[in-house]
Image (cartoon, helix red, strand yellow):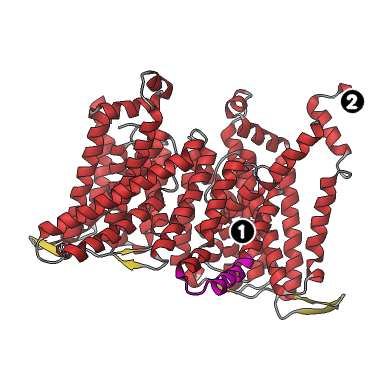
Amino acid sequence: MNSAERKWLPKLIVLAIFLSPILFIHPKTYITLTISGLAMGMLLFLVSSGFSLIFGFLSVLNLAHGALFTWGAYIGFTSFTLINKWTGWGGPDSIFSNIVIFLLALIIAGLLVSLLGIITERLVIRPVYGSHLFQIFITVGAMIVMEELVRIVWGPNDEVMPVPMNFMGSWDLFDVVVSKYPLIAIVIGLIIYFTIYMILRKTKLGTIVRAGVENPEMVQVMGHNIYRYFTGVFAAGSALAAIGGGMWATFVKSIHPAMGGEVIVFALIVAIIGGLGSMTGSVVGALMVGLSYNYVAYLVPKAALGITMLLLVVILSIRPTGLFPEGT
Amino acid sequence: MRKEALNPVQRFHLEEREIRFRNASFLLRMLLLAFFVFTPFLFRSFEVLDVVLKIIIFSALVASYDVILGYTGIVSLGHVLYFGIGSYLVGIFMGRLGWTTYGHLALAFLVAIVISGVLSVLIGLFSLRIRAIFFAMVTLAFMEFTFILSSQLRSITGGEDGISFKLPGILAIDFSYGKFLGVEFTGRLISYYLILILSLILFLLMLRFVHSPVGRVLQSIRDNEQRSIALGYRTYLFQVIASSFASCVAAVAGGCFAIWVRYVSPDSSLSVPIMLDVLLMVIVGGMGTLYGGIFGAAFLTITRAFLPKLQVLIASLLPGVPFAIRLSERWLFYFGLLFIIIVYFFPKGIVGTAQEILSRRKVE
């Protein structure tokens, strides 16, 4: 086997595995499932990328990520409701104003939660850099506190997440049912992925942050305050969690205070599969989890979660450090 | 043998053995045990008995978690999974299958131990291999997975409703042996003593484990992994051993819990909130002490038992202030704050801090 074959063979096998459900499913259903799987994957990517970013660059296992996600969903919910009350942009009139109000709510959620992230990093996490054990405790404590704050501020009950009118329903392309929102989610997810990737690979900021992971002392010698960059990375990770929270809430159309804890487990699995600290890994891992979850949920509904765990076990045994190396 | 001829470790052991039955902490331990034994005679109310028994079970569970966390230095976030396995096997054997005999009760415990042992070895083998930090994530994922599984497989686990069941013979609720010292010996009380004895055995086993040569190796891994590797120990195998041992202990504790409440459900014995409780107990009590678990469990269980009364008090003091009532309802919020504060200022917990103060005094 020559080296080119060796490089492509695993990818082809993975592709074949993900195409194989077409043998059991009607092609039209397959396409519908694939699109919702890709959308779920993109939403998972948003959550796990923030988590993976923080772990990869700060080496902090941030278990409070799920709570930041919940905060994002709730702030998105409130800001959407308020803006909609003032302007009525969430109504059925035009898809353009729908997109504006949706993005506005996401941006507000991202900004406010990144502020929350900065506060958390400064107050709680900075004193325990370098000690995984205490990081886990501290972030668990921060998670409890933040989740309870959600319950205090918004009340402990479920709320119905408002969805822009034109995002509901589906298009009918050549007899294939394509829901609208999943497509929008895929597009937003891809835009965010390329933005992060470009920032990390092509800008000076990205270079400094990546260098800070390799050798913090050297970066400090070069005159950069590494802790300021760390705070920035933490804020960016929090903002990603918040955007993921807002989009996830719109996807499932409801929010509740414990939603973060449920999604964080998926984010963990995705981050481990993709390789901690790798953006590309997060995308690939999230898409794998999203697609396999949807196919299996259609074929054997009860085994849907099992397939995710199976994926984790298989990948950890083949490639113990995840699919992609840190920093890619 | 002369004392000078011994190596430092042997000398340490000799000194330890000489004062074993004479020092204050031994007396304290015996007092604690006596308290647990005589609780049914001291307090006649069922509520107190319930609180004390939960302290006993959770002490065993927290101590088993401490074997992983405090003595081995690896973080598991899914330890309650094994607790749940123990509970569920007793529940399934007694309730779902209806095999209410002593033999099957023992069998349920045995099967729970075997399943927990095998599962934890498997999880440990493929997640501890790389980085200890993966272990935390993978165990959390597995616990969440089992939680969802247990609420979905209605035919086996009864779904979210759980299983309530009856226990055989002298453990059954309607059994009564007659009165002794003015206290009626019902099936409840007999289960209390059974669980006390089982927990005591578990505790002694864990003490033996952490003070055994294997336990010493584990502590060396916790303190300096590189050095332990250099000394020729395959650290990762030792970590797997520790985690599987602790898991088996947790499974037995889970079975005891099921015997006491005669009911199992995903929320009562397998959920993330219980894991958070265990974490908090270990932090409050102190890592790497084993006895800390008792204090941590006592603190949390007692606080939790009296919190509803406190809430009623606040609601009656501040009527018409919904925000204050909402604040008082969210006691978990304060636990979270407490958690952070303790990790900052008393990273060794109650027992650890006390030990430190005592040893400092001894030196002076």
Q: Do callouts 1 and 2 point to residues on the same chain?
A: yes
Occupied quadrant, residue A48: top left
Q: Give residue A316's position: percent from left, percent from top.
A: 42, 40
Assign the N terminus of chain B to one quadrant of the image: top right
Q: Find numbered disc 2 in the image and state the secondary structure of the residue it sits on.
A: helix
The residue located at (27%, 54%) in the rendering is A40
Q: Give residue A170's position: percent from left, percent from top.
A: 14, 63
Residue B356 in view of the camera: yes
The answer to which of A83 and A222 lies nearer the viewer is A83
Left or right of B32, for residue A70: left
The answer to which of A206 and B244 lies nearer the viewer is A206
**Mark 1 vs 2, N-terminal side:** 2
Residue at which label 2 appears: B3
Occupied quadrant, residue A210: top left
C-alpha separation, residue under disc 1 versus residue under disc 2: 47 Å
Residue B306 is covered by the magenta coloring: yes
The residue located at (20%, 56%) in the rendering is A102
Q: Specify the segment rendered in magenta.
A: B305-322
Q: Amino acid at mark 1?
A: Val
Mark 1 surroundings within 10 Å by alpha-carbon count, few (fewer than 14), some (14 through 19), many (20 or more): some
Mark 2 surroundings within 10 Å by alpha-carbon count, few (fewer than 14), some (14 through 19), many (20 or more): few
Q: Chain of mark 2?
A: B
Q: Chain of mark 1?
A: B
Q: Give residue A73's position: percent from left, percent from top.
A: 32, 57
The residue located at (57%, 47%) in the rendering is B341
Residue B62 is covered by the magenta coloring: no
Residue A47 in view of the camera: no
Query: Of helix, strand and loop, which mostly describes the magenta segment?
Result: helix
Residue at which label 1 appears: B111
